[in-house]
Structures are given as C-alpha cells and as structure tokens.
Image (cartoon, helix red, strand yellow):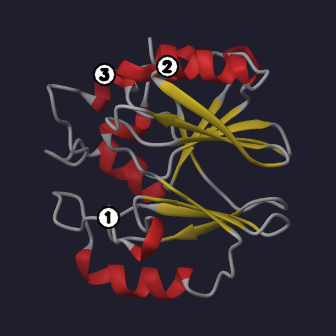
Amino acid sequence: KRKQMRVEKLAREVWKFTDWAGLCSNVYLIDIDVPTLIDLGSKEFSRSLVRGLKEAGYSPADIKKVIYTHLHFDHIGDPNVFKNAEFFASQKEIDDLNNNKIGAFFALFGTNPNALLKGIELKPIKHNSRFTIIETPGHTRGSICIWIKEKRILFSGDTLFANNILGRTDLPNSAPDDYEDSLKRLARFNYRILCPGH
C-alpha cells in the first residue's frame, strides 16, 4: 500500500510533507526556534501528517506553533490534533474569519472552516528574529509568505508555485488588484529553496 504522505528533508531542521493524492497543501516543519508547522493540509490527511511527523522524529505534542499562510480549507487541517500549539495567521485572515465572509475560505466538499477552527484562538502573526513575515495579498486578501534569511528559504503558500506558476486570484476573498505588487515584493528575496503551498 502506497503511503499517503511523503516526507522530505529540505535542509537542516526543515521538512516537507506532501500528500500523494494532491488534495491538500504541502505542510512544512521548521525546528529552528520551536517546532513549528507551516499550514496543516486538509482535515482528511491529518492522520497521514501525524505518521509523517513520526517519520521525521516528532509527535503532535512536540509542535508549539502553527502558522497559516492563509485559511483555505486545504491548508487549515485539523488544528485540534496539535494540543500544545499556538495558532497564527495574518490579521486580515483573522478579520475575514470573524466577519464570516460567505465563500471566503473556498470551502469545497461541505468543509466548514469555522467548525474546524472552533475553540482555536488564532493570533496575529508578527516578525521575530528568525522569521520575516511578508504580506502578499492576491490569492487571498490576507495571504502571507515566510522568509528564513539564515537558510534562504521562502515559504510562499499559494502566492507563488514552482516554475513561477502563479496562484489563483479569482476566489471570493482574493485581492487581484494587489497581486502584482505582492509578486514584486517576493522578487526581492534571493531564495535558495522555494516552499510553495502545492
């Protein structure tokens, strides 16, 4: 039986978890400050993610932070798996969640992001000494990318994919008018490794 989740070590202290079926976002683990996940994929692949973490030498209890690049259903996963984690997103994404914008979370297949995030306190993400948070509205109004200068790794969410493929900006909470400026902002980062959402 083929594994649902592929585990790849990208650099020292950085792992990538990929869903073989392609139905959820990539998930990244960074263990620089504290064990931190960037995005969680979709809820359906939470068990596979737990197995992937185990393969990398971690358990859900080890994860201290989860940073969402944005809050679409295929990125928010099942946060309740990570009991010891704090959860972060941009203030704009949190505002859109609180405003309960219709269709704002691209909730296909009957997924309800509000239900998945029930009981989870989302905190606004800020820069720290290890991570630079880059606001990149376009795919969603509150999309962010994450730059780790010491490793020259750019986590680009659904803003930018490999081979310069661009993310969609035709969704209910997209900000197409801001997208070009966001791409110009990303062009300033001389990354060695690009870690896209898909």
| Badge 2 element | loop
Nearer to me, 188 or 131: 188
The label number, if any, that marks residue 3 in the structure image: 2
Q: Residue sitting at 23 percent across and 41 percent down?
A: 100
- Identify which residue is drawn at 58% across, 70% down: 134
Give the side of residue 87 with respect to residue 151, left or right: left
On the rendered image, what quadrant is the N terminus found in?
A: top left
Q: Residues within 10 Å of mark 2 (few under 14, many from 20)?
A: few
Identity, as a three-letter code, of the amino acid under mark 1: His
Please provide percent x and percent y for residue 81: 55, 15
Going from N to C along the chain, the mark reached first, 3 or 2, is 2
x and y, in percent, of residue 112 in the image: 23, 27
* Amino acid type for the residue under numbered disc 3: Ala
Q: Is residue 79 above or below residue 92?
A: above
Cα–Cα gap, marks 1 and 3: 22 Å
Give the residue type at disc 2.
Lys
Q: Residues within 10 Å of mark 1 (few under 14, many from 20)?
A: many
First in sequence: mark 1 vs mark 2: 2
> Mark 1 against mark 2, which lies toward the viewer?
2
Contact between marks 1 and 2 (CB within 8 A): the answer is no
Q: Report which residue position mark 3 lands on.
A: 115
Q: Based on the displayed image, in which of its 4 quarters is residue 6 positioned?
A: top right
Q: Is residue 61 above or below residue 25?
A: above
